[in-house]
Amino acid sequence: MAATVQQNSMQSENDVQVTAEDQEMINKFARQNARLEDATEEMKHLEKELRNLEDAADEVLMGGDESPVPYPFSSKGIALF
């Protein structure tokens, strides 16, 4: 009997009442957190792309030869002289 009373009191201590307002705030936080994670991943992707483009620009400038440089244009390439 004492174990049952103790178990019931532990359950009531662990139960948390969440109001509709609280749940709305939790959902809003979750959405904003997801947006932050998406933006962070997009920023990392764009930073990597920027580094790649800077490296490519450096390679073109340091190339030194007068050969045409292929430039992507749509699905075809054109040569710049």
Image (cartoon, rainbow, N blue to C red):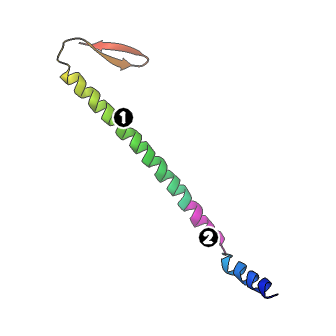
Q: Is residue 23 left or right of residue 61?
A: right
The structure residue drawn at horizontal position 41% and vertical position 39%, both measured from the top left corner, is: 45
Mark 1 or mark 2: name the one nearer the start of the chain.
2
Q: CA distance from mark 1 to mark 2?
A: 42 Å
| Residues rendered magenta in the picture | 17-28
The residue drawn where x is 50% and y is 56% is 33
- Packing grade of label 2 (10 A; few <14, some 14-19, many >=20) is few
The three-letter amino acid code for the residue at tag 1 is: Glu
Picture coordinates of residue 23, whole percent (x, y): 62, 66
Does dot 1 land on a helix, a strand or a loop? helix
Q: Is residue 25 found inside the magenta-colored segment of the image?
A: yes
Name the spot of residue 56 as percent of width and height, x first.
28, 27
Q: Residue at x 70, y 81 (%)?
A: 10
Q: Which residue of the protein is positioned furthest toward the left in this rendering?
A: 64
Secondary-structure class at tag 2: helix
Which corner quadrant holds the C terminus?
Answer: top left
Quarter of the image where one finds residue 17: bottom right
Q: Is residue 3 left or right of residue 50?
A: right
Pick out the residue farthest to the right: 1
Question: Where's residue 59, x and y in %?
Answer: 24, 24
Q: Quadrant of the N terminus?
A: bottom right
Q: Badge 1 is on which residue?
A: 49
Amino acid type at image mark 2: Glu
